[in-house]
Amino acid sequence: MNRTFQIKFKNKIKLYWSLIKSLQTLLLLMTGLAGFMSSRCPWINFPTILGIAGSLFLAISGSTVLNMWYGRDIDSLMKRTCWRPLPSGEISPNKALVYGITLSVLGVGWALVIDLLCGVIVFAGLFFDVIIYTIWLKRRTSWSVVWGGLAGAMPVLAGRTLGTGRIEWVGILLALAVIFWIPTHILTFNIRNQEDYERAGVPTFPSTYGIPTTLRVISASSVLAAITMILAAVGIDITAGQMRLLAVLSGGLLFLAAASMLRPSDKVNFGLFKYASLYMLSAMILLAAVGF
Amino acid sequence: MKITFLDRILLLLTVLLTAYQIVFGIEGSTPLAIASYTVAFGVLLVAALLLIILGFEILDSPAVIIISTIIPLSLSLGLIAEFFPKYTPGYIIFAVTGFLAVMVSRYFAPKKTATIILIVVHGIAGLLIFSLPIYLSVIGTTNQGFLLVGVGGGLFGIGGMLLSFLKTGKPILPRERILSILPVLMLLTTAAFVAGFALA
């Protein structure tokens, strides 16, 4: 009896965990922590570091769950997502909605308690992601990706703002780096899953403007992401060694972006998609390292 | 041939070692040497990352030969710039000309000519990476540990030759054998370079 309960409980946890897209959430959480630690504030302060990590994790998870809740009809039409707990009926929409709202309220509330400005930015991220991107624009225009990018940039800005006590130019550059990076991440993913998106009727850059234009946008956004990341690193005043590594990683991103435009293929597109995620993670670790 | 989990681990270790080398391992050299080492280890780092992400199929790309030429040329340029500065201008001319010759010959020259150019350019750069650290440590300019950079150069030369002949259609070993030892060879090469620079 006890064992059956344990197995059921474990499965339940797995289902609810899958609703928060853990890898994507952790990457965004890392950007927030990097923003915070890059400010060289005395970050080894348990309540503060737990606060920013916890509030961001809850708020990002909450917005992801709400996205899944609202997009469950789209998810059921796509091969890639039809197995998810909501379209497959393993979790009821009402439960997911309550779960998403609870996480979001807890996340934003916690952030507001730590610092008002930080809390407002975390709330803005949630608002941009759920209301503007998912509910309003995602089914209407391929340009929704811009708002998705803006939402994705809020964790790093929130972290930096908490560390410095104000919104300053380095925080804005970090946010811009994420905003410029998002099209590389999303549009390579759109190209890879174009059939799925067309089946679900979701407008994407490849379906609206064609692959060649999308590849040009990806290349341009990669260049801009690399430049703004390096400018932010200059502002943070990372060491020469760290700057060399950031330049190397940026060079890799630009190389793949150029390859995807000059010799487009599924393989190069997939490589750029994966590399872009690694790039963001590595860059954020490098920027966070100045806090040690 | 599919890349295995162990291959990925070995390549990840290579990535971490090269990252360490770029951040900490080349401090104190001359600016040109630092820039050259950064390019060499940077290309190695990105190559290892791409192998992890895309697997061995990436080696089928025609760009591999051109890009892999950057590593020995920039590493040897770094050594010249750091230890034999008076030869630097001449070697820069060789490195740039050699790189351009490899690049142009891949697309516009007969296969035989392209292979000869590749062997000459890789050969000179590889010999410098192999022999200069040994020479410098023997005459006492550096500590004995710098010998390891020469060992790394030797290992790198072996890897480079195996890949180059594979790419030119005349493999020394079967493709599967080459690919199975490539991650180990990359890790050992990088480890030797990192240890050599650290002990210099």
Image (spheres, coloured by chain):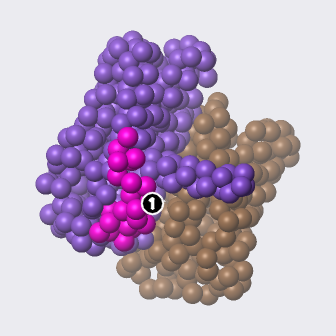
Chain colours: A purple, B brown
Q: Residue visible at 44% across and 15% down?
A: A114
Is B68 placed above or below B16 here? below
Question: Residue A43 at x, y = what percent?
Answer: 56, 18
Rendered location of residue A75, percent (x, y): 32, 62
Relative height, residue B11 to residue A286 (above, below): below
As helix, strand or loop, the secondary structure at mark 1 comes to loop
Indicate yes or no whether the magenta region holds residue A90.
Answer: yes
Q: Quadrant of the C terminus of chain A?
A: top right
Is any atom of residue B156 visible in this view?
Answer: no
Query: Badge 1 sits on which subunit?
Result: A
| Quadrant of the image occupied by residue B170 | bottom right
Q: Is residue A183 left or right of residue B63?
A: left
User: Is residue A244 found left or right of A225 in the rendered image?
Assistant: right
Q: Which residue is mark 1?
A: A90
Specify the amino acid type for callout 1.
Answer: Glu
Q: Residue at x 39, y 47 (%)?
A: A96
Instruction: Please state the horizontal and vertical placement of residue A199, each as a whole percent of the image.
Output: 24, 72
Relative vertical location of residue A236 with respect to residue A70 in this rendering, above or below? above
Lateral position of residue B181 relative to residue A130, left or right? right
Q: Is residue A203 above or below residue A109?
A: below
Q: How many marks?
A: 1
Q: Which residues are magenta?
A: A75-98
Task: Name the residue at 65% across, 62% down.
Answer: B8
